[in-house]
Image (spheres, rainbow, N blue to C red):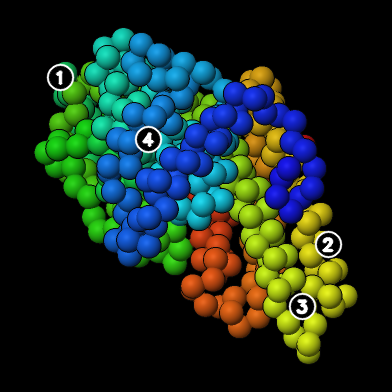
Amino acid sequence: MAGAVKFKRTIFEPEHELFRESFKTFLERHAEPYREEWDENKIVDRSLWVEAGKQGFLGTDMPEEFGGGGLVDFRYNAIIGEEITKARQSGIGFTLHNDVAGPYFRDLANDEQKARWFPGFCSGELISAIAMTEPGTGSDLQGIKTRAVKDGDHYILNGSKTFITNGINADLVIVVAQTDPEKGALGFSLIVVERGMEGFERGRKLDKMGLDAQDTAELSFTDVRVPAANLLGDEGQGFIYLMQNLPQERMSIAVVAAAAMETMLEATIQYTSERKAFGKPIKSFQNSRFVLAELATDATMIRIMVDEFITLLNKKELSVEQAAMAKWYSTEKQVHLIDRCLQLHGGYGFMREYPVARAYMDSRIQTIYGGTTEIMKEIIGRSL
């Protein structure tokens, strides 16, 4: 059953449910005891990544010969995203590692790069990030100014990035950079910067209004000499690679939106059943029932859309426009639902100690990162 949304999901097989139970147990044992500590420190301890690697939760779609799961099946990715959301673990960056950065490494790395990076990627010893956004670009990826100039068997990298998830912990950062500004969209390349390279610096952990434990950072590159052997894929094809992989990133965000909606709706139904006003449970008032009915309908609509699009993604049939639809619609509905749930909690909803308050703050970024709602509508509108 899908929480407060009472219908049976049909996209999972028994092996997926076993994986879900295993991952839930992992979170209960290795993450739940430290949730408050990580929120306070604004970062998740690296030991969690190593433990996740030992238990097979990283690189599920990476080749088995390098320690991966060998299963290119986004349903496993979805389960990880859903359970992290249900557990209110806002800082665990596994979805960025597996869903967003992972496909670039999996599909573009050459044999030498696979041998060098994949074992650590799957073991949790090499944490990954992808650096697209710059202080002056936001969703405008073609406006990227970070520059990589070829110098013999190296690239000289200069520029800065911001809002980078896993930015502090990351050992491998896929940097989107200009390698030939004269070629426009065909002048971008993907270059992997590694921890410890001279000139690669991390700024402060950004002070965000939500997602407290997520290590989001500014990155700067000053004359960083990156070996040409760290070019991921072909030079000049970076923008094309981004367009190919952004649909999965957007589905990853939609997966979180659907799970967050169901989790908070369920919590609010319980709260309004127990909390009384004027001597009666809040849920007994017609207005409360009508609001909950609307929210349950929204959550059901989003669940059906997301599960259908997960199926299409697995079949390699999900279009760029469909991913954009799922991303903007699910996240806008998520923000609306949690806002209404907070209202039903009354003054207690404004208290950080209540899950709805944190869910409210955590949800707000969902309509922004991975491409804003406005950009998603532009992508869809251009195709009509």
Q: Position of residue 365 (x, y in %)?
A: 52, 57
310 versus 69 height, above or below? below
Which of the two discs, 2 and 4, labels the residue nearer the N terminus?
Answer: 4
- Judge from the rendering whether residue 144 lies leftward or rightward of residue 332; answer left or right: left
Q: CA distance from mark 3 to mark 4?
A: 41 Å
Mark 1 or mark 3: which comes first in sequence? 1
Distance, label 2 to label 1, CA atoms, is 64 Å
Q: Which disc number belongs to residue 52?
A: 4
Q: Which amino acid type is marked by label 2?
A: Ala
Residue topped by disc 1: 152
SS for dot 2: helix
Measure the alpha-carbon separation of dots 1 and 3. 70 Å
Q: Is residue 162 left or right of residue 83?
A: left
Contact (Cβ within 8 Å) of mark 4 with mark 1? no
Q: Which residue is mark 2?
A: 293
| Disc number for residue 282 | 3
Q: What is the secondary structure assignment of the residue under circle 4?
A: helix
4 or 1: tag closer to the N-terminus? 4
Q: Residue at x 40, y 20 (%)?
A: 68
